Amino acid sequence: MATQTRPAWAPDHVPDELLWDNSLYEFNSELDDPFMAASRLLDGPPMFYARAAGQNMPGWVIARHSLLREAFIDWESFSSDNASAAMLKFALGVDWNLNPVRIDPPMHTEYRKLLIHFFTPKAVGHMEAGVRETCDRLIAPFADKDGCDFVQDFAIPFPSHIFLRLMGMPEDMLRQFFDWEQGLLRSESPEQMVTAGREILEYLKFHLEEQKKKQTTPLMESIINARILDGRPLNDGEMLGMFYTFYTGGLDTVYGTLGWSMRYIATHPEFQQMLRDNPDKMPKAVDELLRMFSVVMTDRMVTKDMTWHGVELKKGDSVNMPIFIAARDPEAYPNPHEADLDRKEAMLAFASGPHLCLGLHLARREIRIALESFLNRFDDIHIPEGAQYTYHAGSTFNVDSLPIAWTRKS
Ligand code: HEM
């Protein structure tokens, strides 16, 4: 029998038929639409081992909705305190984790309890006026023009504004946050990303010291004065981990979803008009857009040797969780590439289990208000002939530039 040499990146316990000698980032970028590109993996095995997945490292990739949902819930087998968490700690030069997103229960539950009140539908209701005002302010410079770059002019700066409000940071930091955001998300080199990441951290440290003297929002007040476990206050690492999570958690996720949603709206005139004519359908439409354009891939680490759905996993294996593949699984969502407002199946865009996105009500509200602000102001939103849209498909899928044009309402 001829013996074939196994590639160096393939661990011994992974059978040949589950090895995928490809890069997920490159594969997802092969077509005009990364969601369609990624959905080709639904024709293969439910789980496979890629040469290059998240952070271009080898690891398992889960390629079915039902398995992904199960892995999200089973935190005892799939830990969030994993290699990605370690890489970030190394890049930032810190000894704490993103909090609560990279912390497993039971400590995770302690931290989440402190934060949950600020992200309930009621709490988010109180933020609505501020979100609307932010939209108006961002749209004002091009409101009397015939178009804009939706992503550059609106979708990217929008979540930074919301973050500043949430954190009680001064408005004049906006430009700086915008530049850091660009550095973190769009730098050519890892060194530039690390520099941006560390500069953000320095500012968050400064903000923490200021907030210790005088808190400027209820969220800050709650974090600074919190008591956990036996009544001790949070230490600086625990608080900075929370600040950093709010920054990264609500940034490229919101702008990513907005970019793809607007592209869909601008290329589906009937859907667009249906939304204008039926404002009551907007919440359902936002959920369906979030489902179709589930932009996140996160990851976990296997905590023990086990056989999972017939696949042998070893303690320490990295498991990539691309929600963008699960979102187009026809077993979970019939006609997965179509927006269907009558769909009953729950979406997974915000994950599931203990780490279910804490900001999901805020994100829904931001997206609804942003889309309404455009639909109510402008008719016939479309992509001008010959205009190019660009995107990148990393661990989140983001539109980088989306020129749109419209007819101004009289
Ligand atoms: C469309 C927008 C958004 C999407 C698609 C999204 C998606 C997600 C996903 C998939 C997770 C789970 C990550 C994991 O388990 O590894 C998560 C967690 C989280 N998100 Fe979001 N997110 C969005 C917006 C926001 C916003 C606006 C905030 C608020 C600042 C936020 C705050 C958080 C936090 C704090 C966690 C950690 C929850 C925990 O560990 O218990 N997210 N998000």
Image: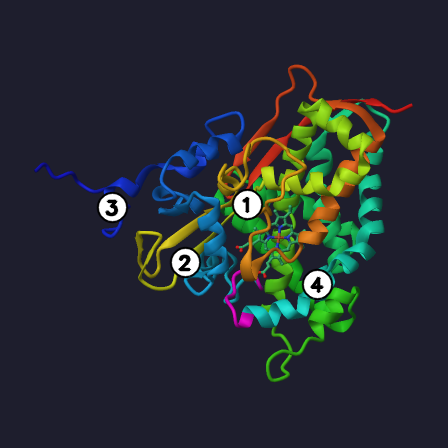
Q: Quadrant of residue 25?
A: top left
Q: Which residue is mark 3?
A: 15
Residue labelled 1 has its Cβ within 8 Å of some atom of ligand 1? yes
- Find the magenta span and give its range: 100-107
Percent position of residue 275, x then y: 77, 32
Q: Earlier in the sequence, mark 1 or mark 2?
A: 1
Q: Earlier in the sequence, mark 4 or mark 1?
A: 4
Percent position of residue 363, x then y: 69, 49
Give the residue type that dot 4 points to.
Answer: His
The alpha-carbon separation of the residues under discs 4 and 2 comes to 32 Å
Q: Which residue is mark 1?
A: 296
Q: Is residue 181 above or below residue 380?
A: below
Percent position of residue 153, x then y: 73, 34
- What secondary structure is marked by label 4? helix
Name of the residue lying farthest toward the top: 385
Q: Earlier in the sequence, mark 3 or mark 1?
A: 3
Q: Which residue is mark 4?
A: 207
- What secondary structure is marked by label 3? loop
Give the residue type that dot 3 points to.
Answer: Pro
Q: Earlier in the sequence, mark 4 or mark 2?
A: 4
Tag 4–tag 2 contact (CB < 8 Å): no
Give the residue type that dot 1 points to.
Answer: Val
For the residue carrying disc 3, how many other residues have a C-alpha within 10 Å: few (<14), some (14-19), or many (20+)? few
Of 314 and 179, nearer the camera is 314
The alpha-carbon separation of the residues under discs 4 and 1 comes to 28 Å
The alpha-carbon separation of the residues under discs 1 and 2 comes to 17 Å
The rendered magenta stretch, by its main secondary structure, is classed as loop
Whether residue 253 is visible: yes
Of 359 and 246, nearer the camera is 359
